[in-house]
């Protein structure tokens, strides 16, 4: 299949490489000519503008995937593409857009005949090697048409054992991607995924902070333990009920530097945590852990704990996220 890819950053660039490795032709666009050139060397087709990208995709149905940050830049890109594409063509937003924006955009494109697909994409900087977990929303015909693209990006079954008792005929979930529902459903599922991620990361951060501070001189001498956090993270990875990829990343970070000296603990939030809490309020669902984990990130910008350094280390590990260079 042929597809256009707009936004060639940490994820968009690696997704392009993974698609080409699977035999798909990818027309790429980014403002930086150097960024495009690096992928052209790997076999991508260069384009110098959105107009050029659409033209090089040839006859329809054409598909254009946007991997841009949520907000105005994505809004402007969808608007521009809506004037360049034809009925039957497909726009895919694979960034972290707010699901209500997806619903609005899909409705606004109804009269044009252009189909809109939202795709929550998880995998971070490891997706090229591991594949991407995809949560897809939009009309079934468009999603079905794009299935070869989704299948190439997804991890596949790999060596993960099948879930006992699972009898669903649709095996896409087992291969790492789902059609979650109509417009906005994909990004809604991804939004909750990221809200849960906040909570899991906060639990690890707080637990390791308690372990570290067990050596505090504020405690009675016979109750102090100088614990080896590197070994603890390693042993928990092996057979423990709290093992996870996040714990793997924690162990990696502590093995390199047990003090996490390169991290300040100034932890950003990318939006999905806030939206998750807003959704919980709208649905009157108590979400104490997820809400507290969001507020902990706000607090981290005032003063920092070892646990918050660990949050920064995990964010860097899975997504390449760097801490802000300015103080708040």
Image (tube, rainbow, N blue to C red):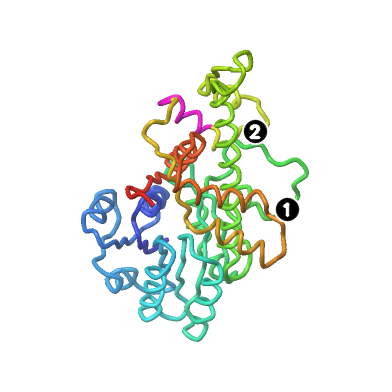
Q: Position of residue 9 (x, y in %)?
A: 35, 53
Element on which disc 1 rests:
loop
* Residue appearing at x 39%, y 52% in the figure: 328
Badge 2 density bin: few <14, some 14–19, many ≥20, Cα 10 Å = few
In the visual, does 64 lie left or right of 230?
A: left
In the visual, does 54 lie left or right of 299?
A: left
Element on which disc 2 rests:
loop
Badge 1 density bin: few <14, some 14–19, many ≥20, Cα 10 Å = few
Q: Residue furthest top?
A: 222
Q: Position of residue 82 (x, y in %)?
A: 40, 79
Q: Quadrant of residue 37?
A: bottom left
Q: Which residue is mark 1?
A: 168
For residue 36, above or below residue 264: below
* Residue appearing at x 47%, y 61% in the figure: 94
Q: Quadrant of residue 282?
A: bottom right
Q: Which residue is mark 2?
A: 242
Q: For marks 1 and 2, give the CA distance.
A: 28 Å
Q: Position of residue 259 (x, y in %)?
A: 43, 27
- The region drawn magenta spans 248-257
Q: Magenta span: helix, strand or loop, mainly?
A: helix
In front: label 1 or label 2: 2
* Residue appearing at x 36%, y 58% in the figure: 25
Q: Quadrant of residue 313?
A: top left
């Amino acid at each position: 299949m042929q597809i256009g890819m707009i936004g060639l950053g940490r994820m968009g660039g690696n997704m392009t490489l993974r698609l080409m490795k699977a035999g798909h032709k990818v027309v790429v666009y980014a403002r930086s000519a150097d960024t495009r050139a690096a992928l052209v060397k790997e076999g991508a087709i260069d384009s110098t503008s959105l107009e050029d990208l659409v033209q090089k995709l040839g006859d329809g149905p054409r598909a254009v995937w946007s991997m841009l940050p949520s907000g105005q830049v994505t809004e402007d890109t969808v608007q521009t593409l809506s004037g360049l594409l034809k009925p039957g063509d497909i726009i895919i937003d694979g960034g972290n857009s707010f699901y209500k924006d997806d619903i609005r955009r899909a409705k606004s494109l109804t009269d044009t005949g252009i189909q809109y697909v939202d795709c929550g994409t998880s995998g971070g900087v490891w997706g090229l090697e591991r594949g991407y977990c995809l949560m897809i929303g939009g009309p079934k015909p468009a999603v079905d048409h794009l299935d070869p693209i989704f299948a190439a990006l997804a991890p596949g079954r790999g060596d993960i054992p099948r879930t006992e008792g699972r009898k669903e005929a649709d095996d896409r979930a087992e291969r790492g991607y789902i059609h979650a529902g109509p417009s906005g459903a994909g990004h809604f599922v991804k939004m909750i995924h990221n809200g849960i991620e906040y909570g899991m990361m906060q639990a690890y951060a707080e637990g390791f902070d308690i372990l570290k501070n067990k050596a505090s001189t504020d405690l009675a001498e016979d109750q102090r333990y100088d614990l080896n956090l590197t070994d603890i993270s390693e042993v928990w990875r092996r057979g423990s009920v709290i093992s996870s990829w996040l714990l793997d990343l924690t162990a990696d970070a502590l093995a390199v530097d047990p003090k996490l000296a390169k991290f300040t603990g100034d932890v950003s939030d990318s939006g999905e945590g806030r939206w998750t809490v807003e959704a919980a309020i709208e649905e009157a669902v108590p979400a104490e852990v997820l809400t507290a984990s969001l507020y902990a990130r706000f607090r981290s910008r005032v003063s920092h704990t070892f646990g918050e350094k660990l949050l920064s280390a995990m964010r860097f590990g899975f997504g390449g996220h760097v801490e802000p260079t300015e103080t708040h």
